[in-house]
């Protein structure tokens, strides 16, 4: 358990020493904000085309962030902070491998995802409503978060392919399974708890601090009723923007320690 607190503390301290990393962690909240802000739409079919272009742009930005955040965290932790130019080059260089790795991960997780979708289906309305049952099904998958982060680092560190990267990542993961599984569950649970607290705070503010208003809020999935609330998106988005680089910094710190990476003296002192 000592390592769990060590990595969390180390990750928390290091994200505030970086600046560029926040540029890459903010796209998800921008996407949510854009979806709720009133924007005058053009007439169809131009409206559909504009919406499609906007969606593609935000998907690309989110994917750039998914690569850029761990890359910036890794470079900072080894004592070689990256610039925006270097990060853009890394995004272009490693995107193919990371897309392939993402597809492989989705394939492995597909039984759980289909199960979650099945329990979320409202038979009477034929619509999906993400319930607490779906969350409980997906939650155990968070114990493998370190495996994903470790694989990314092997790309950055050694320029390896997917097979080599997964092999090293898996060996490190299973050798320190207890600590890494706890970290994964802790971070995911923290994100869910923060989302619930964001929902409670939003409802209280909007109702004039009426405690009874909380009874109508789905704490497991506050997005169900608050996805169009600007206040909720802002409060919840702040947490997401911080937790994304924090998670990367925590797991990459664990990777560097467990793989006995030769860090600069000043980085070893921080341990």
Image: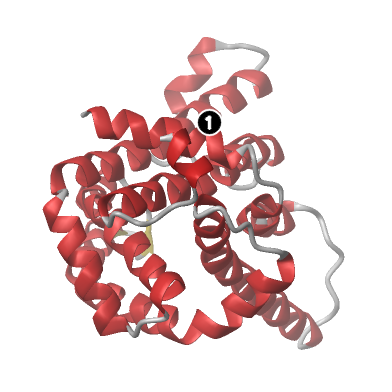
Q: Where is residue 210 in the image (x, y as percent from the top left)?
A: 58, 11
Task: Kindly identify the residue that appears in the image at 63 percent across and 57 percent down.
Answer: 81
Residue bearing the label numbered 1: 199
Image quadrant where one finds the N terminus: top left
The residue nearer to you, when weighing 173 against 216, is 173
Q: Where is residue 169 in the image (x, y as percent from the top left)?
A: 25, 66
Q: In which quarter of the image is residue 187?
A: top left
The residue nearer to you, when weighing 9 against 52, is 9
The residue nearer to you, when weighing 231 against 41, is 231
- Residue 133 visible from this viewpoint: yes
Task: Kindly identify the residue that appears in the image at 53 percent across and 41 percent down.
Answer: 266
* SS at badge 1: helix
- Residue 125 visible from this viewpoint: no
Q: Where is residue 177 in the image (x, y as percent from the top left)?
A: 15, 49
> From what the image shows, is residue 8 above or below residue 253?
above
Describe residue 131's horizontal placement relative to residue 265 as left or right: left
Task: Kindly identify the residue that appears in the image at 55 percent across and 59 percent down.
Answer: 75
């Amino acid at each position: 358990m000592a390592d769990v607190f060590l990595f969390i503390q180390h990750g928390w301290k290091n994200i505030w020493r970086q600046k560029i990393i926040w540029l890459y962690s903010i796209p998800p909240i921008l996407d949510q904000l854009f979806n709720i802000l009133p924007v005058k739409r053009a007439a169809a079919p131009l409206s559909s085309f504009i919406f499609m272009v906007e969606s593609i742009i935000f998907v690309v930005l989110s994917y750039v962030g998914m690569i850029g955040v761990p890359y910036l965290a890794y470079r900072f932790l080894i004592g070689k902070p990256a610039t925006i130019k270097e990060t853009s080059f890394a995004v272009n260089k490693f995107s193919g491998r990371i897309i392939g790795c993402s597809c492989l991960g989705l394939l492995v997780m597909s039984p759980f995802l289909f199960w979650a979708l099945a329990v979320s289906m409202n038979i009477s309305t034929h619509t999906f409503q993400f319930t607490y049952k779906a969350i409980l099904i997906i939650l155990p998958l968070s114990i493998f978060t370190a495996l994903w982060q470790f694989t990314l680092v092997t790309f950055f560190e050694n320029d390896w392919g997917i097979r080599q990267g997964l092999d090293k990542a898996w060996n490190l993961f299973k050798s320190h399974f207890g600590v890494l599984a706890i970290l994964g569950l802790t971070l995911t649970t923290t994100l869910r708890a923060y989302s619930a607290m964001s929902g409670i705070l939003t409802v209280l503010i909007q109702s004039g601090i009426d405690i009874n208003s909380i009874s109508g809020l789905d704490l497991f999935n506050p997005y169900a009723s608050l996805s169009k609330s600007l206040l909720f998106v802002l409060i919840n988005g702040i947490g997401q923007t911080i937790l994304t680089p924090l998670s990367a910094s925590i797991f990459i710190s664990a990777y560097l320690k467990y793989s006995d990476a030769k860090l600069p003296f000043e980085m070893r002192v921080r341990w």
